[in-house]
Amino acid sequence: MFASKPTLTGERVTLRPVGPEHVDGLWELVNDPETTRLTGSHGSIDREAAAFWYGSRGEHDDRLDLAICTAEDDAYVGEVVLNELDTANLSCNLRIALVGPRAYGRGYGTEAIRLVLGHAFATTDLHRVELEVYAFNDRAAHVYRKIGFVEEGVRRDALLWGGEWHDAILMSILAPDWEVKRV
């Protein structure tokens, strides 16, 4: 379903298929303490594994991995991914991560999500895109709601971080929701 790996252009960002040229940015992303907290990422990845990962994403037609680059200077500021494709139910998962405080609050994530959803709903048969956001990530939850995601439920105590339990909020957007929201 995601055999085509497009470049999508907005006012603030350009989304490009991830590749080896984005490894330095990925390395910064996975090593930023705030980003790892917001994404609940406990594991670590070495630089060689990061290079292999980004070098191999283009081979997979069941996912779409795009680097978020600033429109101004093409600097890598994060990634947005459609993955966990369920072709029988025309649904997938969305995840997004920004490199850290230098990328927060500038509209990069909002525009990246809008671009990737616009592409997915216009060029595929997808009906549903879902995501999870940790309850402490108010900024992201606000952005998702603004875009049109609807809260569906809560996975209680889904993340143990810093010795404390945190809930995960499940949200989704359906193709008809997107059609209404994008107008």
Image (cartoon, rainbow, N blue to C red):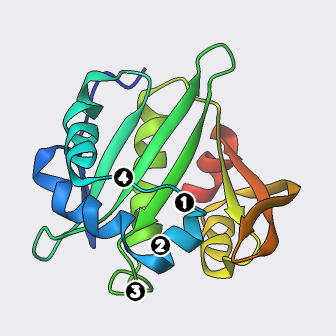
Residues at discs 4 and 2 in contact (Cβ within 8 Å): no
69 and 183: which one is in front? 69
Camera-side mark, 4 or 1? 4
How many marks on residues?
Answer: 4
Q: CA distance from mark 2 to mark 1?
A: 8 Å
| Residue 10 visible in the displayed image | no
Residue 129 is situated, as x and y percent measured from the top left of the image, at: 62, 41
Q: CA distance from mark 3 to mark 2?
A: 8 Å
Q: Earlier in the sequence, mark 3 or mark 4?
A: 4
Left-right relation of 69 to 131: left
> Which amino acid, mark 1?
Ser
Q: Earlier in the sequence, mark 3 or mark 2?
A: 2
Reading the image, the residue beneath label 3 is 101
Q: CA distance from mark 4 to mark 1?
A: 11 Å
Q: Quadrant of the C terminus?
A: bottom right
Q: CA distance from mark 1 to mark 3?
A: 17 Å
Left-right relation of 70 to 120: left
Q: Residue at x 17, y 55 (%)?
A: 22
Reading the image, the residue beneath label 2 is 35
Left-right relation of 55 to 40: left
Q: Quadrant of the N terminus?
A: top left
Reading the image, the residue beneath label 1 is 41
99 and 149: which one is in front? 99
Reading the image, the residue beneath label 4 is 45
> Which amino acid, mark 2?
Thr
